[in-house]
Image: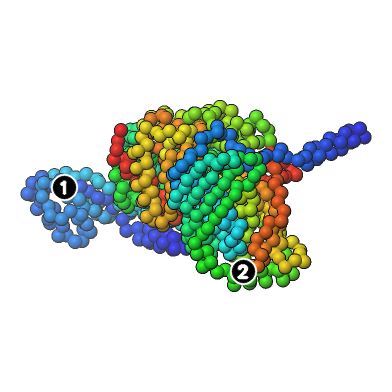
């Protein structure tokens, strides 16, 4: 309603007060004292309606003046007669004003759309995808939407790219929702996308600094088919679906656990070869198109320095490896970074997360994305299991989304700053 | 024409029968496909999974003993843990941990427990447990009121999906949800091993049953989540509760996993 009134007022203003239609702004170059004298006399002539934008005339810099449409020919002739050179800087002041107003209205509306987006609710895929478009439109100088491929059921897979420009800058990868039922991970990623954009716009540390050195790629829904399936409401419904929706060797049991399908000790212990199992690894590494899309994108980019993935639940902040209990070469540093990030997370709500390698904190897992990324030279790899610890589990109440997202952001922000401060 | 009709009828009947055939059973405590991991012995890292799994078993036990519609416990964190092999064939965990009361008080209680996992099949773990200051949570007034309301009501309670997909439930349903969690604890305790980690994922349905006993009688269809295998396990159970006698689980039935699952047995298999 407020927006309607604002637009109405603007329209009234525009139509009833087209004061500047046909007016031009001339840039005048005074080259001598005589010229300056002429201009001074022109300025005194109030009837001419000339609106000098520059005050104080000199030969050192140009003088800008808005000339009403009615006086245009007279003023131009006058300047020519006096050998004063000029150029038309603004051809039609009203047109420019109209364009600016239209842009402002459109920007306000888009800001309202992202501001009025309900972050404290779980949304279906279409709503999330349209949120992404709105976010990109409101921050087109910073964010673009990259399609990295399609899913098994032919849905687009999108990554939001946050970039201040430059060619192939070192980059940070964050994904959510590789397991369909972990809804708080998608919901947190939506909030975090908006938060990165806002922090950049409002110049809030460390985001501008991070983005000056690095790009951020954020994939809000890494398993769109599974996510859509988990929203089906026909009983018996499938809210607790985990996997992809590909057809497997068992026609009764579709779907592959995407986070067991990466080529990192694929077929090792910590995944199943039964298509009916929740952690079915798939017939071969990267058999799933969703995984191939991510792998190909990251490899062809070639300059990722950090890979982070959001899951739920258990409140854990982990690093490689999942496939073995042996320490990763960078374990001490990764443990330190995770510990500090955890402190930042805990500082918001006092939520207790535990830190450790995937193998030791959860269990052995093979074919995990984080192991794959690490084995491809991406040092700063972390996996989050968000709220809670089993009270609600996957069905975390929507009123906890924003708190969860915010505390997660505190940890992510720490890690991103660390990564950008430690190039390799 | 007639032949076609009969053939179609036959085919149709056969199809219906096929649809109604029992689902491929899955072992509820199906051991995850992993090599026999050398389970840690001696002092355990409290944040690692062996200590956490054992502590969760102790919390299931705590719920069976002290849970109610207004009292449900969850593991907050493990402070100290040790594990050792025992002669009879099994593993014994000694634990120092904290539990949170989730339902009402949100209070934290310090507990110590000994959890014994037997290597013998189908043997539930044995738990000895002490927690400090449990008596300080007094839920008697709420329990009495709840019991009175539903044991004397004319319309038996019946509900689906607690919580719903968005994690929401009506305030009226909360005690039934807690009761489900306590009832689930009996099953989770019984089915636990060193290779499982159970939580209750959702109440698919609750239906109050008629009874002449001075109990609330509730039939539940519950979804349990095993964090290790990531499986969703469907259990049907009959639970009784009263303020005096607490929660007792009278019958349990495991519902085998159906194709297309994470859902219960369905007579209309999805395509």
Disc 1: CA contacts within 10 A as few (<14), some (14-19) or many (>=20): some
Residue to which mark 1 is pinned: A62
Residue at the spot x=75%, y=44% of the render? B267
Farthest-out residue, left? A33
Q: Secondary structure at mark 2?
A: helix
**Front position in the image: B246 or A40:** B246
User: Where does the image place residue B9, in percent across and percent down from the top left?
Assistant: 87, 38
Residue shown at the point (10%, 50%) measured from the top left: A58
Quarter residue A288 falls in: top right
Where does residue A202 sit, x and y in percent of width and height?
32, 52
**Residue under pointer 2:** B143
Q: Is there one chain holding both mark 1 and mark 2? A: no
Total marks placed:
2
Q: Which mark is residue A309?
A: none
Residue extending farthest right? B2
Q: Is residue A245 above or below residue B216?
A: above
Pointer 2 local density, CA inside 10 Å: few below 14, some 14–19, many at least 20: some
Q: Nearer the viewer, residue B114 or A352?
A: B114
Chain for disc number 1: A
Q: Specify whether B236 is left or right of B84.
A: right
Residue A166: x and y in percent read 31, 35
Q: Where on the picture, by quarter, is residue B117?
A: top right
Q: Position of A363 compared to B189: left or right?
A: left
């Amino acid at each position: 309603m407020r927006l309607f009134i604002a637009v109405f007022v603007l329209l009234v203003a525009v139509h009833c007060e087209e004061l500047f239609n046909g007016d031009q702004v001339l840039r005048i170059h005074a080259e001598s004292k005589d010229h300056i004298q002429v201009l001074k006399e022109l300025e005194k002539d109030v009837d001419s309606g000339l609106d000098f934008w520059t005050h104080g005339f000199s030969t050192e810099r140009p003088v800008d003046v808005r000339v009403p449409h009615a006086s245009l020919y007279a003023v131009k002739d006058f300047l020519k007669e006096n050998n004063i050179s000029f150029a038309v800087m603004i051809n039609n002041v009203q047109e420019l004003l109209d364009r600016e107003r239209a842009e402002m209205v459109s920007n306000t509306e888009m800001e309202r759309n992202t501001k009025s987006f309900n972050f404290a609710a779980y949304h279906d895929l279409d709503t999330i995808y349209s949120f992404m478009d709105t976010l990109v439109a409101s921050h087109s100088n910073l964010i673009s939407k990259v399609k990295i491929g399609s899913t098994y059921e032919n849905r687009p897979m999108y990554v939001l790219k946050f970039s201040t420009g430059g060619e192939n800058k070192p980059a940070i990868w964050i994904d959510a929702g590789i397991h369909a039922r972990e809804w708080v991970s998608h919901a947190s990623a939506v909030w975090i996308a908006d938060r990165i954009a806002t922090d950049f716009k409002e110049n809030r540390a460390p985001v501008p600094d991070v983005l000056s050195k690095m790009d951020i790629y954020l994939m809000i829904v890494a398993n769109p088919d599974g996510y859509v399936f988990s929203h089906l409401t026909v009983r018996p419904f499938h809210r607790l679906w985990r996997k992809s929706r590909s057809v497997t060797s068992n026609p009764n049991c579709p779907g592959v656990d995407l986070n067991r399908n990466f080529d990192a000790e694929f077929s090792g212990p910590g995944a199943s070869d039964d298509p009916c199992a929740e952690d079915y690894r798939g017939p071969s590494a990267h058999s799933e198109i969703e995984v191939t899309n991510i792998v190909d994108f990251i490899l062809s980019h070639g300059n990722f320095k950090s890979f982070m993935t959001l899951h739920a639940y258990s409140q854990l902040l982990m690093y490689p490896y999942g496939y073995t209990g042996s320490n990763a070469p960078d374990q001490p540093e990764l443990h330190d970074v995770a510990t500090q990030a955890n402190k930042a997370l805990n500082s918001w709500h006092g939520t207790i997360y535990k830190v450790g390698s995937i193998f030791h904190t959860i269990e052995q897992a093979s074919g995990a994305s984080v192991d794959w990324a690490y084995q491809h030279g991406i040092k700063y790899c972390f996996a989050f299991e968000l709220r809670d610890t089993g009270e609600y589990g996957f069905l975390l109440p929507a009123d906890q989304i924003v708190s969860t997202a915010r505390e997660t952001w505190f940890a992510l922000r720490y890690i991103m700053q660390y990564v950008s401060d430690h190039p390799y | 024409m007639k032949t076609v009709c009969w053939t179609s009828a036959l085919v149709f009947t056969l199809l219906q029968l096929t649809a109604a055939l029992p689902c491929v059973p899955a072992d509820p405590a199906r051991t995850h496909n992993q090599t026999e991991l050398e389970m840690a012995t001696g002092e355990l890292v409290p944040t690692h999974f062996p200590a956490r799994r054992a502590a969760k078993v102790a919390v299931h036990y705590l719920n069976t003993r002290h849970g109610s519609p207004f009292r449900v416990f969850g593991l907050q964190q493990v402070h100290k843990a040790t594990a050792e092999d025992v002669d009879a064939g099994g593993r014994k965990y000694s634990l120092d941990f904290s539990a949170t009361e989730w339902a009402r008080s949100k209070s934290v209680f310090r507990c110590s427990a000994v959890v014994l996992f037997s290597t013998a099949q189908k043997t539930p773990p044995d738990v000895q447990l002490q927690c400090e200051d449990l008596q300080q949570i007094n839920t008697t007034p709420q329990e009495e009121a709840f019991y009175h309301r539903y044991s004397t009501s004319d319309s038996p309670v019946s509900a689906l999906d607690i919580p719903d997909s968005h994690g929401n439930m009506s305030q009226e349903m909360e005690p039934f949800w807690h009761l489900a969690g306590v009832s689930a604890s009996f099953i989770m305790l019984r089915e636990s091993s060193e290779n499982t980690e159970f939580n209750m994922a959702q109440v698919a349905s609750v239906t109050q049953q008629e009874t002449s006993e001075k109990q609330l009688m509730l039939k539940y269809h519950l979804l349990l989540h095993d964090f290790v295998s990531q499986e969703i396990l469907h259990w049907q159970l009959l639970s009784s509760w009263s303020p005096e006698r607490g929660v007792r689980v009278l019958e349990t039935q495991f519902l085998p996993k159906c194709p297309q699952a994470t859902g219960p047995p369905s007579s209309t298999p999805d395509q």
